[in-house]
Image: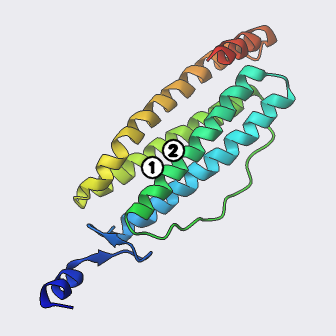
Amino acid sequence: MNENNLQTKKLINFGPSGRAVAQPMEESLLDNFFEHLTMERYANVQYFSIYLWFQERDLNGFSSHFLNESKDEMEHAQKFADYLIARGQSVKLNELPAPVQTWDSIEDLISYSFKMEADLTSSLQQLYSMSERISDTRTNVFLDPIVESQIKSEDEFANILGKVKFASNQPSAILLIDSDLKKK
């Protein structure tokens, strides 16, 4: 091996997976990425559980909405895993708690879902702030469309919660909301 090749090889960073990386990830940012990945995976499982809950009650609009949300959260988890791999990391999957499967009311269920979306938004904002603080522009570019999509999702859940809250558990009003969700 000639001198130039040896020097070039020494200048290349490799991540824990052995993959070449242009910019290593800071440890605290990486830890927060793993936490967020766990949140996305949990949201996937929780929304699937909620899909089943609505399916058992023949509320097909709600169930369809939550099945789509479950799929979206799995897609988000996959994007985070793919990004970590692209940054030379070995993806660490943390254990997930069991999803909540019983609810006192639809309003409680939608409130829980809204809170979960708000927590995901906060986690993304924290990741964004951390990456900005350490000048990890690659991560900010990766997060930009995800943050935008997350804010829309949070707004959508706020809208559904407002309708459900206004319906006050009246069956006819819940069926109208269900029908509206089925159309989407």
Is 76 on the left-hand or right-hand side of 2? right
Is residue 23 positioned above or below 119 on the image? below
Residue beneath the point at 59% across and 65% down: 93
Q: Are marks 2 and 1 in contact (CB under 8 Å)?
A: yes
Q: Which of the colour schemes (rainbow, by chain, secondary structure, one colour) is used? A: rainbow
Is residue 152 positioned above or below 145 on the image? above
Residue beneath the point at 71% across and 12% down: 179
Secondary structure, mark 1, is helix
Q: Residues within 10 Å of mark 1 (few under 14, many from 20)?
A: some
Residue beneath the point at 76% across and 17% down: 169
- Residue 103 seen in this snapshot: no
Is residue 66 positioned above or below 95 on the image? above
Is 122 on the left-hand or right-hand side of 50? left
Q: Residue 63's x, y, as percent? A: 74, 28
47 or 97, which is in the foreground? 47
C-alpha distance separating marks 2 and 1: 6 Å
Q: Residue 163's x, y, as percent? A: 62, 16
Residue beneath the point at 41% across and 77% down: 18
Q: What residue is pinned by disc 1?
A: 123
Amino acid type of disc 1? Ser
Q: What residue is pinned by disc 2?
A: 119
Q: Residue 11's x, y, as percent? A: 20, 79
Is 120 on the left-hand or right-hand side of 41? left
Q: Quadrant of the C terminus?
A: top right
